[in-house]
Amino acid sequence: MIAYIVRRLLHGVGIVLGVLGLLFILFFTVTSPEGMATKALGEKAPPEAIAQWVTNHGYDRPLFWNPESWSDTLLVDHYYSMLSFDFGRSDADDRPIMDRIKQGAKPSLYLTVPLFFIGLFLSLSGAMLVAFFRGTFIDKAGLVVSVLAMSIPTMVYIIAGQYILGKVLLWFPISGFDRDPTMVWKFLMLPVIVGMIESLGGGVRFYRTVFLEESNRDYVRTARAKGCGELQLMTHHVLGNAMIPLLTQVVVAIPHLFLGALLTESFFGIPGLGAAMVEAIHGNDFSTLRALVFIGCLLFIVAQIVTDIAYTVVDPRVRLK
Amino acid sequence: MLIQAHVISNYVVAALVVGVLLLGIGILRSRLWRRSLGTLVKRRPIALGIVFLYILIALLDSVSWVGGTHMGSRGSEGADLVSLQEPQSVIDRFFPRDFQEEGYAHPFSSTHFYTDKALRYPGRHILGTDINGRDVFHLSLSGARIALLVGGLTSLIVIPIALFFGICAGYFGGRVDDAVFYILSTLASIPNILLLIVLVQAMGKGTLQVCIALGITSWVGFCRLARGESLKLRELDFVRSARALGASETRIIFRHILPNLMHLVLITFVLLFSGLVLSEATLSFLGIGIDESWGQMVDLARLELARDPVVYWNFFGAFAALFGMILPVNMLGDTLRDILDPRTLSEDS
Amino acid sequence: MTQPLLELKDLETSFPSSAETVSGRASVVEGVTLSIDAGEVLALVGESGCGKSVTALSILRLIPKPGRIERGEILLEGRDLRTLSIPEMRKVRGNQIAMIFQEPMTSLNPVVRVGDQVVEAIRLHEKVSRKAALARTLELFEKVSMPDAKARLRAFPHELSGGLKQRVMIAMALSSHPKLLIADEPTTALDVTVQAQTLELLRDLRQEMDMAVLLITHDLGVVNQLADRVAVMYAGKVVETGTREDVFRQARHPYTKSLLRSMPALAKPQEPLYEIAGSVPVPGEWPAGCRFVTRCEEGDDFCGEEPAPRRRLSHSHACWCHRVEGVQDES
């Protein structure tokens, strides 16, 4: 078991290094430091200002190979600063990026954690319901509604939610945030509801397929043949087996959460990491963007490793090879 | 003399149409495919019709030329609004040349929304006009071209590449597989939306850039699928027996592996298509989408919803056009999966 | 005459079909009438795709949707199972009638320990504590000669061989002393040596527990070892019934005769093996008259026109064939 975890971690390290390499290629070779400077300072910036910007950021050093000192290259610098979480300062307002990340983490979690669990719970229950009534009117209606729901862009959900629940019905404040934990729920209600409705369509449809696929298996027939009721069948037998594809889907949903948070946070004025990223995109703040993307990838890779370990718990057939 | 951009794009459109038709004829020569597609036509005639309508609109909007006439123009009045040198597409020509007001107008209204000034074309803007006075209905129609470009062109590029790497990795295994798998897991470790953002930021805005970024992010999933399937197929009896009979590797791949992946290709294509169009909408919100896409229209329109009295029609127009395309495409994808994916077939006795 | 344990009367089960039929459905089992006495082993024999498994699943009303039982009666000790409510039916399943399946590999829940799966079966029908049920499970495992039974209680299905998995299935089926055990190709997926052991186990257990067995198989060797009576099915219909001796010694239906001739054990060495030409037609494309007519060596044009009538050959032996002389029943 420990050997398995170690091997999985090593694999994860390899992936992290690869991701960093890709980020380097994209940030430093596909777009040049001059390009970044032009974007950050504007098209009309004088060449001296651009040169100054490049020098200030230390981007005037060689990319891959420095004949004088091998470690004094942008590549080494890139790997070193990312891996040591020393992200430097923002291109836009010169504040330390780490501060922004620390500030943003909490509001992001306030939003995504309830959204994630409530959404998962509702998707699973909805999927079980339609799978339970498979082939009937409820199943068909459920499917139609999910396909409808999946055909609407995230943005429209947010806009419609803000408009209907916030502006017309006046149930919740349209946007804003409060760092006081006792007050924050008021601002979180609307984004959580909107996010939930948005994820429901795809969720129900996916889990329904999983449940239906499982209900066609031989062991389900065996369970029926020994007199098992449909409810016990679903909760006891099918759910247990569906956990396996389910886990994968949960991990796949984690970056999707990030995406949801990306749009949701900036629309609802929640000062989380997603909002920080949108700001960085709009302000051409490459340093912040690079740091945030790296953090996002890191979280995702960790989540994948955790899933793989969780598999060994859920599925006895997974051999620790 | 330099050939003008619109002429090149006309040729590209013609070449694409011919290519797709040839591909279609090739597919229809197989009896199995004819039957599956026949079932599709029988089960989802309306969705298919709508999708074809969208494709037709997009194609008509892609063919353009300079000069010629517009329908319903009122003489030369305001003709200077649109330069005569600018190429106009077939769709553009369905509208008057100077189909332009000075600002918002309510659908079917005969005056501007905020002033009482009379419209140039009173009652003719069935979906109203946007902040610049452009006709929302016309803009919504033109969005189909961008959507088809984003969804169709990207997947047409992505699928062959993904298929190539997937089959190579799955079929040959070993080092090839290790390399492809490493690239795949690295790419897959970057959440989709982040990769998209980074790619577009690095390459800069623009239609081609967005398509490339979407292509890079979306090939991973399908490549994995193709890899997994070819891995499975490689071990199946009919492939083994072909190998035992001395068939060459290329022959096995083209005769045995590829045809057995075709149903996945088709399902992926349809589902990828809608996913791409929706992703573009998200990018549009982030300010890095494609100009004049539906996503951008929705993004621009959302600011108007805060106005009082509310300006709803351009939001509605863009959303209806987007939804009207994605829904039938998703339904077709669903039905296709039912028809082609044997896993979902009911058990036989 | 005493009441049989289980009686099927004119059973018909259908599935949706792509074949050109008016209803869009095709009957996979049609007009099947069978009976099993308490303690008796009835073997249901036939090629793949002739409706044996569907008959078995129909008895427990486990036909997967969109299949359904169209008509007929399924009488368990005189009570029609088709009229039972779903909860009532659940009390019959696994309790009075238990079933074991062809694929021991996939018929057990892969993520639940085998002991717990048997415990579940016990506790579904009896109010006993988990502990007591586990003790019973251990007894059952010993009864089915599970080697190292105690440790195996905690095993997962993938840790057991096919033969052992089938033993778990049998233990599960026996857990509530069923009156009837339906065994659907119980040995087909197993190795030959394991097949023999499993058959022996089934034979012993049946005598010990005095239960009736409906044995579904295409293997006439298995039938010869285990069965008291035999029913031969072809294309959704029963074509011949009789005691084992009736069928093996005095088979009358051309299909039964062909089946017997194609048994390798009965063929003479050096002679090419006999085979029945063609294969079972797909449901929905069955001939109008006698269904075997397309492959029959003895049939003539008339056979294709009318369904074959039941001919009684002795008190135990009956056959559905135009060409067989015998007492014709009214049905």
Image (spheres, grey):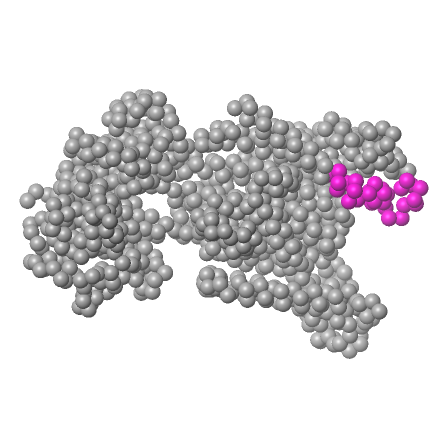
* A32 falls in the magenta region: yes
**In the figure, is residue B333 to the left or right of B118?**
left
Tell me which segment is drawn in magenta. A23-51
The image quadrant of residue A240 is top left
The x and y percentages for residue B158 are 63, 52
Which residue occupies the extreme bottom position in the image?
B75
Among all residues in the image, which is located at the extreme front?
Answer: C270
Residue B298, position in %: x, y? Answer: 67, 54
Tell me how many marks there are.
0
Image quarter (top left, top right, bottom left or bottom right) of the C terminus of chain C: bottom left
Residue B241 in view, yes or no:
yes
Residue depicted at x 17% and y 30%:
C208
Q: Is residue A49 left or right of residue C43?
A: right
Q: Measured from the top left, where is residue C127 in percent x and y?
A: 27, 27
The answer to whether residue B211 is above or below residue B185 is below
Expressed as whole percent of the image width and height from the top left, the position of residue B292 reads 72, 58
Task: Pick the residue in front: A321 or A166.
Answer: A321
Quarter of the picture holding the N terminus of chain C: top left
Picture residue at 84% right of the left edge, 69% below the top: B1
Is residue B233 found left or right of C249 in the rendered image? right
In the rendered image, is residue C283 in sight?
A: no
The part of the image, by quadrant, that contains residue C105 is: top left
Considering only vertical position in the picture, is A218 above or below C126?
A: below
Q: Main secondary structure of the magenta part?
A: helix
Residue at the image point whose x is 65% and y is 57% from the top: B153
Between A245 and C159, the residue placed more toward the observer is C159
Which residue is more in the foreground, B257 or A39?
B257
Q: Residue at x 83, y 67 (%)?
A: B2
Q: Image quarter for residue B95?
A: bottom right
Q: Is residue C175 above or below residue C41?
A: above
